Image (cartoon, rainbow, N blue to C red):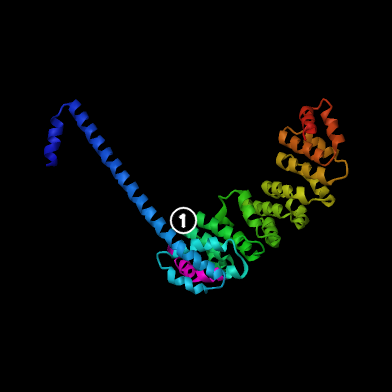
Amino acid sequence: MIAYYWQNFLMMSRQDQVFFILILSILFLLFFVIFLGFTTFYLRIKNHLRFKKFSQLEKVWEPILLDILSEDRSPEDVQAYVNQDSMWQFLSYLSRFIAVVDGDARKQLIDAGSPYIKHVVRKLRSWKIEKKAEVISLMNRLDPEKYDREFQKALNDSSFLVNMVAAKALARKGQTENGEAILDNLDRFHIWSVNLLSSVIAQVGISLAPALRNLMLNRNKPVWQRVIAIETLIKLYDFKSGDYCEDICSEGENREVIAAYLRLMRLIADERHASVMRKLCERDDPVILSNAVRVLTQISTEENETCYKKAMDNPSIWVVINAAWGLKESGKLDILRKYAYSDHPRAGLTRQILTEV
């Protein structure tokens, strides 16, 4: 039959063939649009019924949870109103209550959800990526201290999304072991921005500083990991990191590591670091020079005319800007005015920085 229609099609004129194909295309698109319309309508009805169902369940759960909070009922009483199908919605609803209470009330609500959390944890490995991340987020909202082991395992998951949610769940103030687990798995976070990752790690607090300093000093580690450690130490204002100034600023050290360390030194450096900064000013690298001069202007009470002159004469405008701002912020305005009101090539830029608030 197909061969018959095909032969008829070939016997048509060119114009009729084009017209026939156009009609078939229009009919196909029409049926496709109708199919999409019915599918959209079906999914909307399905979601509406589901929403209505769980809204009704929430009206049942709410008075029970309030009774549990007032100690009129035990946490086990809610189990009669939660089944396999509604378990996930119940935990999500329960987490909203837990977020606004603490102490014994929080413990009571956690006890009410414990049987279902255990079931969720057992299925964690078998779920899809988005569901895994959602489960970890839910566990973090409910009882994070209890599930640190699962969070640490999730750091090794193949999904970047799961790694990210697990790291945020682990990074809690004072949980040094969790912070060290994140540092041990830093290779999973190479696509994170430096600022975001260091901000997450810094939430653990100053107790993580020794591990961060060890990572900073370890030249066998990738440069980006050492930079992450330094950026985290910046956010923690770790003054003890200044003890390693000569080690980090040595001749064989990586440029990016030195530049990051000098940003830390802006916050923690003092007069004892001035000699190391002067040595760095002898280098021709504009990145290192600009940061070293910025640190030197803030910590040194001596005149370092050679360092300032090298920075102000540098062809890189960023070196000049850093040097000028450093002199202004440290109150060395006489030196800055000497360049501003002269025939120096950077006099105009220096005058602009002098007048800025």
Q: Point out residue 238 in the picture as x, y percentages from the top left corner.
A: 74, 56
Give the magenta-colored segment's residue range. Answer: 108-127
- In reply to whether residue 42 is colored magenta, the answer given is no
Q: Is residue 335 above or below residue 78?
A: above
Q: Is residue 255 above or below residue 54?
A: above
Q: Give the structural element (helix, strand or loop) at label 1.
A: helix
Q: Please, what is the three-letter code of the amino acid marked with disc 1?
A: Glu
Left or right, 6 with reference to 302: left
Residue bearing mark 1: 130
Left or right, 145 with reference to 323: left
Q: Point out residue 72 in the picture as x, y percentages from the top left corner.
A: 54, 73
Image quadrant for the C terminus?
top right
Q: Quadrant of residue 30?
A: top left
Q: Quadrant of residue 46?
A: bottom left
Image quadrant for the N terminus?
top left
Please name the residue shown 54% across and 70% down the image: 68
Q: Quadrant of residue 85?
A: bottom left
Please name the residue shown 11% across and 38% down the image: 4
Q: Is residue 250 above or below residue 59?
A: above
Q: Nearer the viewer, residue 83 or 135?
A: 83
Left or right, 144 with reference to 347: left
Asked whether the viewer can see residue 55, the reply is yes
Q: Main secondary structure of the magenta part?
A: helix
Q: Point out residue 83 in the picture as x, y percentages from the top left corner.
A: 41, 68
Q: Nearer the viewer, residue 14 or 132?
A: 132
Please name the residue shown 33% across and 50% down the image: 42
